[in-house]
Each structure stands twice: as C-alpha cells, then as structure tokens.
Amino acid sequence: MSELRFTVDHEWLRLESNGLITVGITAYAQQALGDVVFVQVPELRAFGAGDEVAVLESVKAASSVYMPLNGEVVEVNSSLEGSPELINEDALGEGWFFRMRPSDASAMDTLLDQTAYERLTHEDA
C-alpha cells in the first residue's frame, strides 16, 4: 500500500499499482460526522478538482465528498449504498468511495502528506 495523501476537505487518496487512485473520507471526518446512514456514490464520468461528486448523511449532518484532482471516476464502491456503516467501521479500507483515473498523476504531490494532515486536524481540534 502506498503512502496516503490528504485534502483539506478530509479526503484520503491512495495511488494503486494500476495507476488508479482510491479515494475515501478520513477517520477524522468520519468521527466528526458520527454514524453514516446514507451514501450517494458518484457517477462514472470526468470531474474537475473541487467538484462535488458524492453525498453522505450521518446522524449529525449531511456532507459532500469532493473530487480531489482533475480526472475521471472509473469505479465506485457500490457496497456503500446498502451498507453505509462501512465508512464508520473502516473509513480507510472497505469504506472507500471511488477510484479515479487522474488527468495528471503528479498532482498527488501537491496534496497533504500524513504529517501535514495531522497538523491540519490538530489545528481544527
């Protein structure tokens, strides 16, 4: 498993060996939201960085998931639609949202690494 990268919107990204990027929400975001009860996964199409691609609802609030980089959503975790609790149970694993093919894979280098993300979340706390 490659090193994770993070966005300021609390998404995590993992570059897979096939060149695709798996995207989900961080454990920090999941804890802030509480129990996730509904997920609307993204459409399989191209999006620009920052576009809203998915929606989730928790017992506390509704929240959006944003496209972290320019690219195309090529696979979604359809298990989330019937089992949104996967996000609560394993946000960094089985609770992933989608896989994307980035327009420019080197854009991952502009995202936060683990240390920078931890600094961000400690500032929020």
Image (cartoon, grey):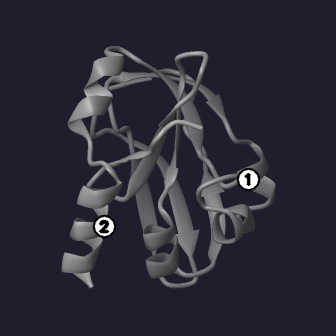
Q: Left or right: 75 with respect to 111?
A: right
Residue at 30%, 50% in the rendered image: 7
What amino acid type is highlighted by mark number 1? Glu
Comparing 19 with 57, the one in front is 19
Percent position of residue 57, x then y: 55, 69
What amino acid type is highlighted by mark number 2? Glu
Distance from Cα at disc 2 to Cα at disc 1: 29 Å
Mark 2 crowdedness (10 Å alpha carbons): few <14, some 14-19, many ≥20: some
- Tell me: residue 20, above or below residue 22: above
Percent position of residue 67, x then y: 38, 38
Q: Left or right: 89 with respect to 65?
A: right
Mark 1 crowdedness (10 Å alpha carbons): few <14, some 14-19, many ≥20: some
- Tell me: residue 97, above or below residue 98: below
Residue at 64%, 63% in the rendered image: 87
> Residue beneath label 2, please?
118
Labels 2, 1: front one: 2
Label 1: which secondary element:
helix
Residue at 62%, 48% in the rendered image: 96
Where residue 125 sits, quadrant-wise, is bottom left
Q: Left or right: 77 with respect to 17?
A: right
Percent position of residue 56, x then y: 54, 61
> Residue beneath label 1, please?
81
The image quadrant where one finds the N terminus is: top right
- Tell me: residue 7, above or below residue 125: above
Label 2: which secondary element:
helix
Residue at 41%, 57% in the rendered image: 64
